[in-house]
């Protein structure tokens, strides 16, 4: 079953409370939160106090994308819950085993993020630890980018790689420019979770109930 992770980076801060309520009422599966430190990527994301305030407004699980140089420092501040997803980057830490061990202690779902330039072969070791892959169709750091030409070819290669190794139980989340057209393509290619942002449910930084229903209908296979 296809799931939606609504990207709060693409929302309007002034209407965030009502937006979260609408997302929950319409059956969105996750709230996607980009955590950025200005070093691993040249942008800043949600602060810890802000994240904690969002927790108080919803029962939806969080889908964290950690774009930080020191995940060991950030992870304990997130108040992780079992149903949460946490995507980490292979390139983010020299102490990746320590990061994995720490996340296992929270019993949340560990995903590995694949940048457009990250080789798929890192899964040769990472498949032992992960529940899923956060497949980035754009370079990380900023919303509103267009999908990179390499994305579809690499996704097909990834799917074949998982099949060859009998790792098809690993979920694939697609993150970046998930327009209606692109979401349809990636659903047909076998993606499981779709990060929905400015190119679909948050046009002009405003959550659209109409577009949200349209996105849900598309993922259910309706026109």
Image (cartoon, grey):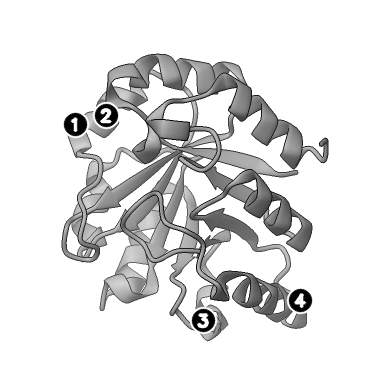
Determine whether the residue tagged by mark 2 lies in a helix, strand or loop: helix
Query: Residue at point 74% right, 38% down?
Result: 218
Determine whether the residue tagged by mark 3 lies in a helix, strand or loop: helix
Q: How far apart are labels 1 and 4 at the CA level? A: 41 Å
Residue 27 location, x and y as percent?
A: 62, 24
Q: In this view, does 83 lie above or below 172?
A: above
Which residue is the site of mark 3? 125
Query: Residue at point 60% right, 28% down?
Result: 212
Q: Which of marks 3 and 2 is in front?
A: 2
Q: Is residue 49 among the parts visible in the rendering?
A: yes
In this picture, residue 183 sits left or right of residue 67: right
In this picture, residue 124 sits left or right of residue 55: right
Query: Residue at point 55% right, 76% down?
Result: 150
Looking at the image, the residue that sits furthest to the right is: 222
Residue 174 badge = none
Which residue is the site of mark 1? 49
For the N terminus, give its image quadrant. top right
Q: How far apart are labels 3 and 2 at the CA level? A: 33 Å
Is the Cβ of the residue at disc 3 closer than 8 Å to that at disc 1?
no
Q: How crowded is mark 4: few (under 14 residues within 10 Å), some or many (20 or more)?
A: few
Q: How crowded is mark 2: few (under 14 residues within 10 Å), some or many (20 or more)?
A: few
Q: How crowded is mark 1: few (under 14 residues within 10 Å), some or many (20 or more)?
A: few
Which residue is the site of mark 4? 163
Residue 10 location, x and y as percent?
A: 38, 38
Is the Cβ of the residue at disc 2 closer than 8 Å to that at disc 1?
yes
Residue 95 location, x and y as percent?
A: 27, 75
Determine whether the residue tagged by mark 1 lies in a helix, strand or loop: helix
Q: Residues within 10 Å of mark 3 (few under 14, many from 20)?
A: few
């Amino acid at each position: 079953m296809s799931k939606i992770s609504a990207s709060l980076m693409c929302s309007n801060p002034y209407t965030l409370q009502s937006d979260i309520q609408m997302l929950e009422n319409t059956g969105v599966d996750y709230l996607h939160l980009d955590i950025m430190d200005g070093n691993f990527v040249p942008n800043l994301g949600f602060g810890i106090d802000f994240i904690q305030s969002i927790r108080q407004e919803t029962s939806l699980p969080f889908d964290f994308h950690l774009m930080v140089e020191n995940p060991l420092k950030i992870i304990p501040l997130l108040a992780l819950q079992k149903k949460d997803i946490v995507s980490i980057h292979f390139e983010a830490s020299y102490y990746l085993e320590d990061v994995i061990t720490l996340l296992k202690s929270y019993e949340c779902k560990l995903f590995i993020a694949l940048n457009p330039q990250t080789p798929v072969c890192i899964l040769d070791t990472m498949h032992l630890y992960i529940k899923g892959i956060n497949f980035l169709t754009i370079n990380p750091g900023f919303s509103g980018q267009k999908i990179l030409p390499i994305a579809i070819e690499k996704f097909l290669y990834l799917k074949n790689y998982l099949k060859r190794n009998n790792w098809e139980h690993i979920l694939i989340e697609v993150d970046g420019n998930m327009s209606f057209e692109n979401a349809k393509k990636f659903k047909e290619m076998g993606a499981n979770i779709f990060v929905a942002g400015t190119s679909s449910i948050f046009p002009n930084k405003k959550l659209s109930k109409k577009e949200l229903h349209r996105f849900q209908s598309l993922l259910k296979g309706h026109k």
